[in-house]
Amino acid sequence: MSSVKQPASLSEPILAADMPARQQLQTIQAVRGVAALVVVAFHLTQFIDGTYGEALWFGVFERGFAGVDFFFVISGFVIVYTSQAYIGRPETLRTYLTKRAIRVYPIYWLTIAIMTLLMGVSLLLRPNGVGKVITNRWPGLDTILLTPHHHALNIVSWSLSHELFFYLLFACLIISRKLWVIPAFFLVGCIYMALTRQLYVDGQTSIWAYFWFNPLNAEFALGALAGYGFLHHTIVKWEGIGAAALGLVWLYSFGDTPNEFFGERLLHYGVASMLILIAVLAYEHLRRPRLPQWIVRTGDASYLIYLIHTPLLLLFTRLLTRVFPTYSAVGVPLACFALIIVVTYLSILTHRLIEKPLMRYLSARLIPRKKAVAIN
């Protein structure tokens, strides 16, 4: 696949001096947005079931946590697609790590700061009510750095620790191609755990089993494999159709894989996500589609959708139970749909006004460069 001169990189800052700019893959942006919204719908489904004992939207999103599996596969693809030229070039390590830190931490820290502020206000207003609950929930250094098994003030931040772990494994290849044995070691360990362990319960399993050798880590490898194939193989039409058909059959042939069964999730949702990703890439390669801007913008804001929906969900649930003390078959689903619209709009707005300018500002000051290409 030939490189193009358009700047854009799936929300990745690219250095023209370090590597060729990649064409933005709008379909990948779109499916990232869809994956983020599926996770939002999953958390809404959990709340409605726990509060009212009813299945929101006929339970369509009861397995919406699989959006995280899709995220992991896409992340593996994105890193290979945007950073493959760094492999074996240790002089680019600082640039790579700085870009990854800029992508993950600043906006995450902003959400943590806002949540901490809200906790402080709640403590002042209701010290004997909510205050007792949140006293032991203040973020620590582990929360700020996203270390393994950190105290997750934002409940989705556990997945960011796995993202960072994958970035570090890829960094081994940047230092030296000979260090491929390190990511290979962890990949083999993840596959071993997937084959030998069944139920994973946070806090009741060792950090080796639950994090370092978590089967979900292998999903990044599936995405990386798809990325390598996309860069080095010309996709033909029948391959895309075959991947789409097999991916859908695979997705709906395993029943409902539980959230905590990570090995089964790897086999079920991880493999299905890779196949669907290959189909999407084939469509992108063969059609070069121009998608509606609102779809692309939703994908651009997918990280924000993922981060901010949980604190907004806390406020929403309190309001919803006051407006609807008992379940309303019309009102509750409509209110949940309205929340998704609000989360999406606020995320797009925040991405345009805060996240994107902040990333550009930090990149311009922290990343050594000869000529910078704009962050998408």
Image (cartoon, helix red, strand yellow):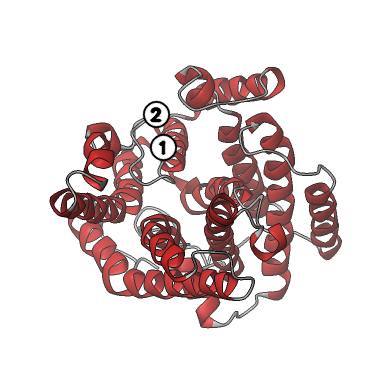
Q: Secondary structure at mark 2?
A: loop
Q: Quadrant of the N terminus?
A: bottom right
Q: Which mark is residue 170?
A: none
Q: Residue at x 62, y 53 (%)?
A: 53
- Mark 2 surroundings within 10 Å by alpha-carbon count, few (fewer than 14), some (14 through 19), many (20 or more): some
Q: Quadrant of the C terminus?
A: bottom left
Q: Which callout, 1 or 2, points at the residue further toward the start of the chain?
A: 2
On screen, residue 33 versus residue 363, left or right, reads: right
**Nearer to me, 220 or 181:** 220
Q: Which mark is residue 149?
A: 2
Location of residue 222 with respect to 283 vertically, above or below: above
| Residue 359 position within the rendered picture, expressed as x and y whole percent measured from the top left | 28, 61
Q: Is residue 371 visible?
A: no
| Residue 10 position within the rendered picture, expressed as x and y whole percent measured from the top left | 48, 62
Q: Are marks 1 and 2 in contact (CB under 8 Å)?
A: yes
Q: Which mark is residue 161?
A: 1
Nearer to us: label 1 or label 2: 2
Q: What amino acid type should be assigned to the residue bearing mark 1?
A: Ser
Q: Residue furthest left?
A: 124
| Residue 96 position within the rendered picture, expressed as x and y whole percent measured from the top left | 35, 45
Q: What amino acid type should be assigned to the residue bearing mark 2?
A: His
Q: Residue at x 67, y 29 (%)?
A: 263
